Amino acid sequence: MFERPPISDRPGQGRSIVLASVNFGEPDYAEGLEELKLLASGAGLEIRGVIEAKRDRPDAALFVGSGKADEIAACALEAEAPLVIFNHNLSPVQERNLEKRMQCRVLDRTALILEIFAQRARSNEGKLQVELAQLRHYATRLVRGWSHLERQKGGIGMRGGPGETQLELDRRMINAKIKNIEARLEKLGKSRALQRRARQRGGALTVSLVGYTNAGKSTLFNTLTHAGVYAADQLFATLDTTTRKVWLPEAGQVVLSDTVGFITQLPHGLVAAFHATLEETAKADLLLHVVDGASANRDRQMEEVDKVLKEIGASEVPQIVVMNKIDQMGVGPAVALDECGNISRISLSARTGAGVDLLKQALARFAQDRRRDDLQQSEVDQHGME
Ligand SMILES: Nc1nc2c(ncn2[C@@H]2O[C@H](COP(=O)(O)OP(=O)(O)OP(=O)(O)O)[C@@H](O)[C@H]2O)c(=O)[nH]1
Ligand SMILES: [Mg+2]
């Protein structure tokens, strides 16, 4: 009842959309808009028009000015696009007001990302996580969802809607469903924690690949493990964490995980829903922070990743920055050390393989240091017991 079919499969609605984007004077505005276009086309949508606006701050009721809203509506009508996607997070009220004024469906950036995740989730856990995030997102927009259905039934301009009782009922149903999914996820999380403990007892080094979406994590994962994980030039190609054991000379057994990519303004509900999986990341011995070195936004993207790592309590995990795609940067492989002499950054190309041996050596060194630290620690523990 409250579950919406994916945008692209909705009967009577094509895949055509119009994008709306407001420039508030932020320096990386243009890149943000490019990212939105990638997200939309990655979701299988055809962009028929892009309307931009400049503002100091969002309008409380409509996010944009009323004239701009009319301009967007006219563009959507002209392009026969039944859906307008905003490059921002809208409040439920703004979304509702916009739909009313423009007489078409409106999605915000969060909903678009959730949609992509829903299309891509493969594992049972991934699907549950996305469903949870979607339910939480739509729970606040329940009224809007209903008025939309009413409009479809009675035609545009029809008055009336379901009574408060019906809404109450639905809200209760959603809450019950949310609780149910939370319980199932908790169960899955527990069994994963057991697996992790079993792995830790094995003494293998655990390494997680993290980074902005499209940085090249899966490509590097494949280069290191020959696993054949899906890597593609699209945002959020990977949703489900893949873990493989690899044996690297000198480093020994390494448990390597490929993870979901991060993005600017990653929807909060999504981070919350993916918490268990992301926590896995936080518990690794080492994080390889993969960066698209050829991207014009790499500094902003790195900041974003660090922000999410902090949110999930992983900022204290040792990190090596992997500056990827050097084949596009016109530089050679390189290693940089921090002030303590630890390897802090490696420049390589996951695609050509240049510099990957430097990374393997770094992993070997890290594994050796860790073994030495473990040994010292156990000696300290023993003395403490004497
Ligand atoms: N030129 C070049 N392209 C690369 C390199 N590494 C990865 N790519 C390309 O970058 C794109 C994204 O690669 P993925 O490995 O899927 O990136 P990812 O970080 O796993 O992305 P998500 O799973 O979407 O978060 C693909 O088209 C890769 O072929 C590299 O070293 N050089
Ligand atoms: Mg990937």
Image: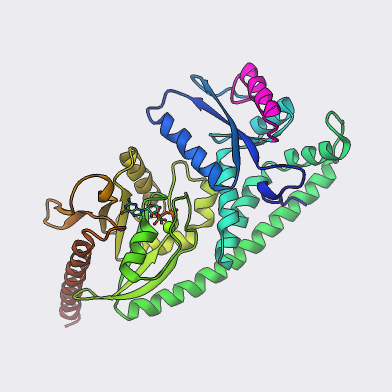
Q: How many marks?
A: 0
x and y, in percent, of residue 156 in the image:
83, 31
In front: 373, or 259?
259
x and y, in percent, of residue 94 in the image:
64, 30
Q: Is residue 48 left or right of residue 82?
A: left
Q: Quadrant of ligand 1?
A: bottom left
Residue 188 is at least partly visible in this image: yes
Q: Is residue 346 left or right of residue 281?
A: left
Is 300 situated above or below 352?
A: above
x and y, in percent, of residue 251 in the image:
22, 73
Q: Residue at x 43, y 65 (%)?
A: 229
In front: 58, or 40?
40
Q: Residue at x 46, y 24 (%)?
A: 24
Task: Identify the image quadrant of residue 163.
Answer: top right
Q: Residue at x 39, y 49 (%)?
A: 212
- Is residue 311 covered in magenta? no
Task: Identify the image quadrant of residue 346.
Answer: bottom left
- Is residue 66 covered in magenta? yes
Q: Which residues are magenta?
A: 61-82
